[in-house]
Amino acid sequence: MDNISNSELNSINKFFQDFTGSVERILSEKFDESIFEFIDFSVMSVSQISSTDDLKENNVLYKFNYVVEGIKGHGLVLIPEEFVAISADLLMGGNAKDVYKGSLGELEINAALNLFNSLLDDMKITFKSLYFKDLIISSGAEIIAKESNKYTEILNNIAFDFSIIHSLNLGKEEQFAVTFLTNAAIAKQILINIEVLEEPMIAQGFKKIKPKELEGFADISNIADIKINIEAELGRIKIPIKQVLGLVGGSIIELDTHDNADIKVFANGLEVAKAQVVVVDEHFGIKITKIISPEERYKDL
């Protein structure tokens, strides 16, 4: 079993929380809004597990395969049968009242499969928008009911050693626990590749150098000769059109820059520094007084 630190657990929690909106959105679209006043889906816990014995009762298995950045993984979602029955009934125009009878029929399973596939499709879009990478889901996703001969075999697969438990609330009356199982080592590798988790040390004694430690040492030889536009802005002011039309030689426009105040320096339109105006051999120039940090530079983008 691949050990996961507390900080990694927190990062994984945040990662899965980013996709809860997909579930809420699709369920709200599929279900009659008059049935439930609200739908809430949130992460309750993330943890490593050594056994799936307590997860078998009255859950169907939604099994699918996925690929991210060439890394293949298997996902297994344990979904309460009662929620499957309610979902199928709503999708077929029912009112979700007293629909679960202790087992599921083929019609209910097929309806639920289509619903869960729609959820995955929306999650793929969310994944792409967040990480600019593709989440590829195999076309063979399936639902396995507890009566199936392969139910226990799949659930007891030793590759599943990590769980993410979600709380699903349909209005004030219906609450369900939905559990996602995966392999910890594979999950960590994928999250490292999409930069959710930091890459671990390759070998003992080698320090992982963080981006801030590389400042001033980056190899920019391939782009060093590219030219960029540097502009210095003395100041700005907004004036009415009638004042512009009245400008003549000798007119004075008061700017928002105070005496001896630093002016702004832009590189290709992005403010990168503060400076003072100087005169060098009868030419105007600027003397840099402050370099704006990357954090300040991008916080308003």
Image: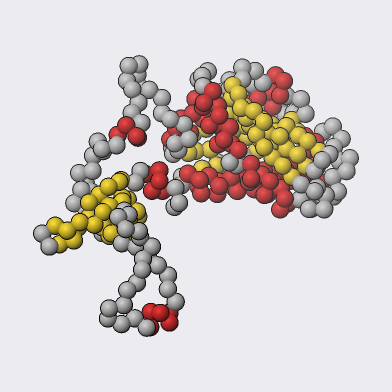
Quarter of the image holding residue 98? top right
Quarter of the image holding residue 234? bottom left
Instruction: Residue 60: tell me if it is visible.
Output: no
Residue name at image x 55 percent, y 47 percent: 126
Instruction: Please tell me which residue lies in front, 234 or 32.
Output: 234
Q: Position of residue 188 (x, y in %)?
A: 49, 28
Q: Position of residue 270 (x, y in %)?
A: 35, 55
Residue 99 left/right relative to 138: right
Q: Position of residue 22 (x, y in %)?
A: 63, 46
Looking at this rendering, what residue extends furthest in the front direction? 259
Q: What is the number of callouts on the image?
A: 0
Instruction: Please tell me which residue lies in front, 195 or 1.
Output: 195
Quarter of the image holding residue 227? bottom left
Looking at this rendering, what residue extends furthest in the right direction? 98
In this picture, is 135 found above or below 214? below
Instruction: Residue 95: tell me if it is visible.
Output: yes
In this picture, is 213 found above or below 124? above
Q: Position of residue 121 (x, y in %)?
A: 59, 47
| Scheme of image coloration | secondary structure
Residue name at image x 53 percent, y 44 percent: 127
In this picture, is 147 found above or below 271? above
In this picture, is 84 found above or below 3? below
Residue name at image x 44 percent, y 77 percent: 240
Residue name at image x 41 percent, y 28 percent: 199
Instruction: Please tell me which residue lies in front, 198 or 177.
Output: 198
